[in-house]
Image: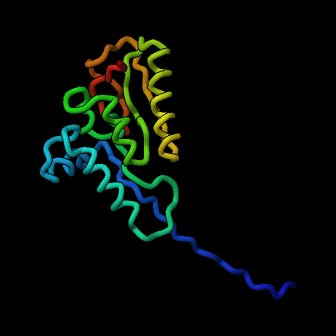
Amino acid sequence: SSNRRKHHHHHHHVIRSVAPNPTRLSLTEGYKAAGLGKFGQSGSLCVSSIITAAVKSVNVKKAGYSGLMLPPLEDSGLASMAMETYRIQDLLLYSAVCGVGLDTVPIPGDTPKEKIAALYMDCSALAHRLDKPLTARLFPVLGKKAGEMTEFNSPHMCNGKIFSVD
């Protein structure tokens, strides 16, 4: 038999993120509470930057993603304001101060591949210039045009307007 002791190490890591949930209060309420108007209006970039800085300042070991996420199909407020107070280019702009690029963004199913490629190139250029990883989870919705509503049947997603890809 061995006299070695077993050592148990407990690692406490926290996922530091502000991520929406379809059944909870919308992130857009926080933007509105800042007193600068609705999400997508002037001041939204600044509020996004402040939220991201606050999340990253929490002094704990991080696990996984850390930052602010703005996925339109996972937040009821973002879903309802899509194509009204903000567009796909605004989400790309906010990703400069957030942690994620374009996340759960519905686009028309007939969007030309060249336009999708150009959007990926914009995201890639921003990621390269800022030296940070950015993603682009685009959801082409067959049979739907920009401005029409999605019709997903999932407890993890909200239905919202489909973004135009200009």
Q: Which residue is at the far bottom?
A: 3
Tell me residue 41's x, y (percent): 19, 38
Q: Which residue is at the far front?
A: 129
Picture quarter containing residue 162? top left
Q: Is residue 49 left or right of residue 129?
A: left
- Count the labels in the image: 0
Viewport quadrant of the N terminus: bottom right
Picture quarter containing residue 39? top left
Res 155 visible: no
Q: Residue at x 40, y 53 (%)?
A: 67
Examine the rendered structure and indicate whether residue 120 appears above or below residue 94.
above
Q: Is residue 152 left or right of residue 131?
A: left
Question: Which one is nearer the viewer's eye here, 165 or 161?
Answer: 165
Q: Residue at x 37, y 26 (%)?
A: 106
Picture quarter containing residue 89? top left
Res 58 visible: yes
Question: Which one is nearer the viewer's eye here, 94 or 71?
Answer: 94
Examine the rendered structure and indicate whether residue 98 appears above or below residue 9.
above
Examine the rendered structure and indicate whether residue 54 appears above or below residue 6.
above
Viewport quadrant of the C terminus: top left
Tell me residue 160's x, y (percent): 28, 28
Tell me residue 12's x, y (percent): 52, 70
Tell me residue 101's x, y (percent): 43, 39
